[in-house]
């Protein structure tokens, strides 16, 4: 288990950088911005006194919620 | 890419154009937005949370929790006040605020007593709506509450940008198939607005690819998309439905008028010149199907337009065929 809930976001950011060449180019900046906003939200929730478990759950829901959009984009780009 | 731009509060035309660009008004509920609203409501402990988008004369909710409401007149929308500034709108007691004390949502039996809204600012600087929470008791919102809502609002905008990217076809700039199907589903529900579907296929596309190469094929797709887009009305929607196939949703139009428009599109394409395949010309075949009470589903609507398109191909291509029950129904995949 990760100690800091925002670790999940940083991990996702790392993978975006690593896969940058394979992702559709037009989606990379949008994804990066989205992850920056997730990090901001995580920090804000922490400052507001939310527990790490609450924040982790919140981040998990938010990351999962756009997963389908990401798959749609990749499917559109690759025609699959 | 820069995601921050100076707020433009005095350009209503540009603001509405940006809202339209998101292609989100009157779309079906989507889990990603419902989930954000559920989180906002829970984290801020508010009875009501909503994503409100401010159209020209109404506010429309992409997601709302805590009350059954789809839209309201813009004139009574708290969020219409929120979008006029870059700052959050905090109303701790609506009955003590001259702007809202006579608002029908405040004066009704279970009146709204508090409101916190943060504008949804697009990357190009327009407030298209707001993310807000409301309650039935007066409430003092803390700076931390405001910061949390502001962070959710920023995330929501990037989620809308991501949604937009997923609905655009990269090559032609038209809607993607998923984006178009969403618009068709919305049109299917709006039975008070006459709608017509055009399925458009580039004739002999394989021959273009074989003779002139795939780059010429791509150029043909962009060429056709551009001509179609330039000759559509603002209310119409165009999407790339398959490899060399486009679909157009025509709104607020009768079938005879749609037929004239379709034939004008066909003619515009047929006279357009494209250097990559010169001296050949690109032509298109078009199948047309109106949305009438006998169309049981979106799939059937598409199938009807597809059947008419198939007939246009059989008749010799470069023509428009209107669906009628006498056409041979199309089952399974159409042969190009």
Image: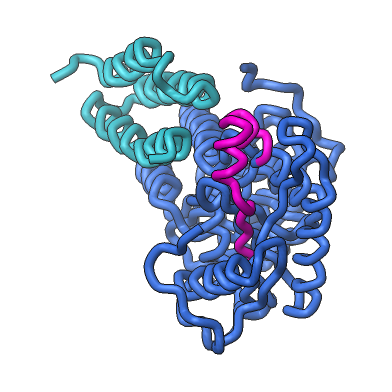
Chain colours: A cyan, B blue
Question: Split into 4 quadrants, where in the image is the N terminus of chain B?
Answer: top right
Which residue reaches farthest left? A1
Q: Reply above or below: B113 against B257.
A: above
**Spot occupied by residue B55 in the image (x, y as percentages of width and height):** 72, 54
Position of B148 with respect to B116 (left or right) is left
Position of A62 with respect to B299 (left or right) is left
Please name the residue shown 61% across and 43% down the image: B130
Tell me where residue B257 sits by quadrant: bottom right
Residue B90 vs residue B213, the one in the foreground: B213
Q: Reply above or below: B1 against B278.
A: above
Q: Is residue A53 something that shows in the picture?
A: yes
Please name the residue shown 61% across and 56% down the image: B201
Q: Magenta residues: mostly which secondary structure?
A: helix
Tell me where residue B312 sits by quadrant: bottom right
Please name the residue shown 47% across and 19% down the image: A32
Q: Reply above or below: B191 against B104.
A: below
Q: Reply above or below: A41 against A62.
A: above
Q: How many marks?
A: 0
Q: Is residue A44 something that shows in the picture?
A: no
**Spot occupied by residue B64 in the image (x, y as percentages of width and height):** 48, 56
Q: Which residues are magenta?
A: B197-220
Position of A43 with respect to B264 (left or right) is left
Please name the residue shown 24% across and 24% down the image: A52
**Spot occupied by residue B227 in the image (x, y as percentages of width and height):** 78, 47
**Spot occupied by residue B104 in the image (x, y as percentages of width and height):** 67, 68
**Magenta includes B198?**
yes
**Magenta includes B70?**
no
Tell me where residue B188 sits by quadrant: bottom right
């Amino acid at each position: 288990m990760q100690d800091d809930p925002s670790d999940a976001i940083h991990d996702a950011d790392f993978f975006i950088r690593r896969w940058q060449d394979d992702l559709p180019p037009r989606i990379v900046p949008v994804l990066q911005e989205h992850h920056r906003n997730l990090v901001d939200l995580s920090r804000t929730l922490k400052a507001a006194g939310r527990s790490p478990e609450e924040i982790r759950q919140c981040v998990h829901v938010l990351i999962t919620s756009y997963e389908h959009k990401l798959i749609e984009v990749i499917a559109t780009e690759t025609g699959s | 890419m820069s995601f921050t731009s100076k707020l433009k509060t005095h350009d209503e035309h540009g603001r509405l154009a940006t809202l339209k660009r998101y292609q989100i008004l009157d779309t079906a509920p989507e889990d990603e937005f419902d989930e954000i609203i559920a989180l906002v409501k829970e984290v801020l402990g508010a009875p009501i949370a909503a994503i409100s988008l401010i159209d020209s004369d109404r506010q429309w909710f992409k997601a709302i929790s805590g009350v059954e409401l789809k839209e309201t007149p813009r004139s009574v929308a708290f969020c219409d006040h929120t979008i006029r500034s870059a700052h959050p709108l905090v109303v701790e007691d609506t009955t003590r605020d001259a702007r809202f004390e006579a608002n029908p949502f405040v004066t009704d039996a279970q009146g709204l007593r508090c409101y916190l809204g943060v504008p949804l600012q697009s990357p190009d600087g327009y407030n298209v709506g707001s993310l807000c929470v409301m309650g039935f008791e007066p409430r003092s919102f803390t700076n931390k509450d405001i910061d949390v809502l502001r962070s959710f609002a920023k995330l929501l905008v990037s989620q809308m940008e991501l949604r937009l990217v997923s609905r655009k076809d990269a090559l032609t700039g038209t809607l993607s198939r998923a984006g178009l199907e969403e618009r068709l589903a919305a049109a299917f529900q709006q039975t008070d607005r006459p709608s017509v579907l055009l399925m458009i296929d580039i004739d002999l596309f394989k021959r273009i690819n074989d003779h002139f190469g795939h780059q010429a094929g791509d150029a043909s797709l962009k060429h056709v998309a551009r001509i179609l887009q330039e000759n559509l009305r603002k209310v119409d929607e165009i999407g790339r439905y398959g490899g060399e196939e486009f679909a157009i949703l025509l709104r607020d139009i009768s079938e005879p008028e749609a037929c004239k428009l379709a034939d004008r599109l066909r003619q515009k394409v047929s006279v357009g010149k494209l250097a990559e395949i010169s001296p050949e010309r690109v032509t298109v075949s078009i199948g047309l199907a109106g949305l009438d009470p006998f169309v049981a589903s979106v799939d059937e609507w598409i199938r009807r337009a597809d059947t008419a398109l198939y007939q246009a191909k059989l008749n010799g291509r470069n023509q428009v065929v209107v669906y009628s029950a006498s056409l041979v129904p199309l089952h399974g995949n159409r042969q190009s």
